[in-house]
């Protein structure tokens, strides 16, 4: 996993008029941590938020008590499991969250790579489930990680099937660049979305992190509704064409299986 160092301070949007400033501050902290899934130190949060340190300490303690945040492995704080649990409930039917783990773990075992389930949340793709093959050489993923929808084939695949209003919002920018391969030119991004809209799978490399590839396929439910995307992430170097094709084929088959399970579950209820 490659860690990205956060900027010390960023300009915060003006707060709406509210009778609950503590709630506004808590939301501000959660958004800051959402932008940095590997975590931020208390000092970085104080610098970025402008919240007095004594107040910040009390807020962090309260958020941690309810598992909205948790200690980060490298120090500081990161989003906690309670947020992921709530996001899962809000974003997807319970059937998908219950059916996906076994499918994902089988897929992770078959391709020997990390597998994740991502859904659209606003202008970002949110990781809601992860299956880890527990190998030493692998790309790691965490529940709660967010990635802008224009960065990477998996995210663009979701965006391509999301509809024109979201396209317009994303294309209006700004478009963050993370590597030399990130699509940040609106015309090229639109062309890519038009192409991806014709299919249900994609494979890309090095758009979000140099050297990291991903194979993704859409998971659909009743009425052909897109529920999310099943994604296998891997270290691209050393992979043969045959291995890459195998990973993509397995991801497509697993996504199709999960989609069929979703449709059958809906039919069973009726």
Image: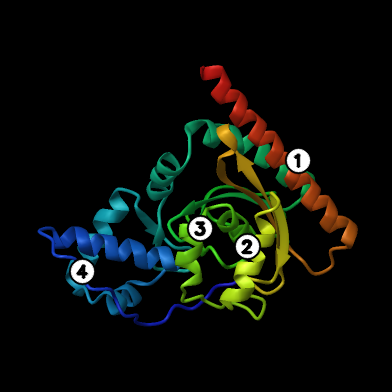
Helix or strand or loop: what does disc 3 sit on? helix
Labels 2, 3: front one:
3
Q: Which residue is mark 4?
A: 15
Q: Which residue is mark 1?
A: 253
Spatial CA span between label 2 and label 3: 11 Å
Q: Earlier in the sequence, mark 3 or mark 1?
A: 3
Estimate the spatial distance between the alpha carbons at disc 2 and disc 1, rounded to whole Å. 23 Å
SS at mark 1?
Answer: helix
- What crowding class fits label 3: few (fewer than 14 Cα within 10 Å), some (14-19), or many (20 or more)? few
Q: Kindly state the secondary structure of the residue where label 4 is placed.
A: loop
Choose the circle earlier in sequence order: 2 or 1.
Answer: 2
For marks 4 and 2, give the CA distance: 34 Å
Left/right of residue 91 with respect to residue 185 in the rendered view: left
Callout 2: helix, strand or loop? helix
Disc on the earlier residue, 2 or 3: 3
Mark before the other along the chain sequence, 4 or 2: 4
Residue 75 in view of the camera:
yes
Residue 223 rendering spot, x and y as whole percentages: 57, 34
Cα–Cα gap, marks 1 and 4: 46 Å
Q: Which mark is residue 164?
A: 3
Residue 218 image position (x, y, % from top left): 64, 46
Q: Are marks 2 and 3 in contact (CB under 8 Å)?
A: no
Residue 188 image-quadrant placement: bottom right
Residue identified by numbered label 2: 193
Q: In this rendered view, identify the residue nearer to me: 56 or 165.
A: 165
Residue 213: where, in percent of width, then height?
71, 64
Q: Residue drawn at (71%, 51%), measured in percent from left and top?
A: 199
Q: Which mark is residue 7?
A: none
């Amino acid at each position: 996993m490659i860690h990205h160092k956060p900027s010390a301070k960023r300009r915060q949007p003006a707060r709406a008029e509210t009778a609950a400033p503590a709630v506004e501050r808590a939301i501000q902290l959660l958004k800051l941590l959402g932008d940095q899934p590997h975590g931020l130190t208390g000092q970085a949060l104080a610098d970025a938020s402008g919240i007095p340190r004594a107040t910040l300490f009390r807020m962090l303690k309260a958020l941690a008590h309810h598992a909205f945040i948790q200690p980060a492995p490298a120090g500081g704080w990161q989003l906690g499991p309670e947020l992921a649990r709530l996001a899962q409930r809000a974003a997807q039917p319970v059937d998908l969250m219950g059916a996906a783990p076994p499918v994902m773990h089988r897929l992770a075992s078959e391709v020997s790579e990390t597998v994740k389930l991502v859904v659209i949340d606003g202008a970002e793709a949110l990781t809601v489930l992860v299956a880890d093959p527990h190998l030493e050489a692998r790309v790691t993923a965490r529940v709660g990680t967010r990635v802008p929808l224009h960065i990477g084939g998996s995210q663009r695949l979701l965006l391509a099937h999301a509809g024109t209003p979201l396209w317009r919002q994303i294309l209006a920018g700004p478009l963050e660049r993370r590597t030399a391969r990130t699509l940040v030119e609106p015309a090229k991004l639109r062309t890519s979305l038009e192409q991806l809209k014709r299919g249900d799978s994609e494979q890309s490399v090095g758009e979000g992190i140099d050297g990291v590839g991903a194979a993704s396929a859409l998971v659909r439910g009743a009425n052909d509704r897109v529920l999310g995307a099943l994604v296998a992430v891997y270290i691209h170097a050393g992979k043969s064409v045959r291995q890459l094709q195998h990973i993509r084929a397995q991801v497509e088959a697993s996504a199709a299986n999960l989609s069929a399970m979703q449709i059958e579950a809906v039919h069973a209820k009726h």
